[in-house]
Image (cartoon, rainbow, N blue to C red):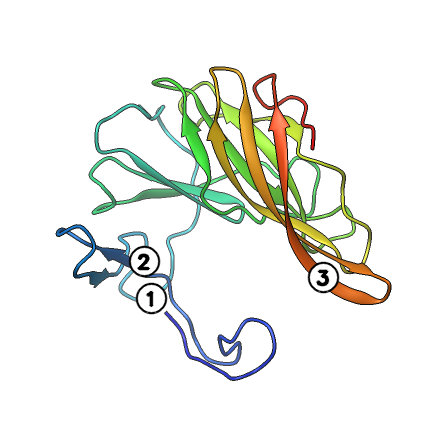
Amino acid sequence: LGYHKERDGHTIDPDRPSVPRQARSLDGGQTWTIETPSYIGEDGEQRPATALSAPVDFTAPDFAARFRNDRFYYSLDRCRRWEGPFPLPTFGRPGLLARTDYLVEGPHRLTAFVSAEKESGGEGQPLCMRTTDGGETWERIGWIGHQPPKGYGYAIMPATVALTEDSYLSIIRRGGVFDGIKRWWLEAFLSPDSGRSWYM
């Protein structure tokens, strides 16, 4: 929740405060209520990240997860109360640029698709990561596509579906420069081996 500013690109005003909020509908989307997530304190700040103390049951009936930058959160009651944040590894990159995109694959197995900063910093290169111990540890399974060039050029915000037990399809948001002109497009990547390798 922030303030509008008329300008090129994203039109949120970077010089004024913005805060995380979530919206909930109980009537199929006809009406919505705005809620302050429980990971926001009375001072308006997020709780600091702490280590996960016990494995999460990802198959709990009201489970939900949230991934944001180098942190993840989970809820067992449809986002009324959030646990976390919990830190995520950055896999040798300056940081993560994670957005929520994940597949529950068992009680303690969850595969997430996030973006990492480029080696030189900034946006971004997507990757597949997985936990098999309920979120206590995470492994990088595979990079999705090549690292974009230094400077302007990004690959971010994967949106992924499982096609079979072992195959995924992920759509990546892309930006780059061609003949001196900035351009934007979507790219589709297919993994036939549970996220280890990816093909256009």
Q: Which residue is mark 2?
A: 40
- Nearer the camera: disc 3 or disc 1: 3
Instruction: Residue at 69%, 33% (x, y): give it.
Output: 200
Secondary structure found at label 3: strand
Using a 10 Å C-alpha cutoff, classify the residue at mark 2 as few (fewer than 14 neighbours), some (14 to 19) or many (20 or more). Answer: some
Three-letter amino acid code at disc 2?
A: Ile
Using a 10 Å C-alpha cutoff, classify the residue at mark 3 as few (fewer than 14 neighbours), some (14 to 19) or many (20 or more). Answer: few
Is the Cβ of the residue at disc 1 closer than 8 Å to that at disc 2? Answer: yes
Dot 3 or dot 1: first in sequence order is 1
Q: Which residue is mark 1?
A: 44
Secondary structure found at label 1: loop
Could you tell me if residue 189 is visible in this image? yes
Instruction: Residue at 47%, 15% (x, y): give it.
Output: 165
Is the Cβ of the residue at disc 3 closer than 8 Å to that at disc 1? Answer: no
**Residue 135's mark?**
none
Three-letter amino acid code at disc 3?
A: Arg
Secondary structure found at label 2: loop
Q: Is residue 176 above or below residue 156?
A: below
Three-letter amino acid code at disc 1?
A: Gly
Tell me if 67 is positioned left or right of 64 in this view.
right
Q: Which residue is mark 3?
A: 183
45 or 78, nearer to the observer? 78
Q: Is residue 112 above or below residue 10?
A: above
Percent of width and height locating residue 17: 43, 75
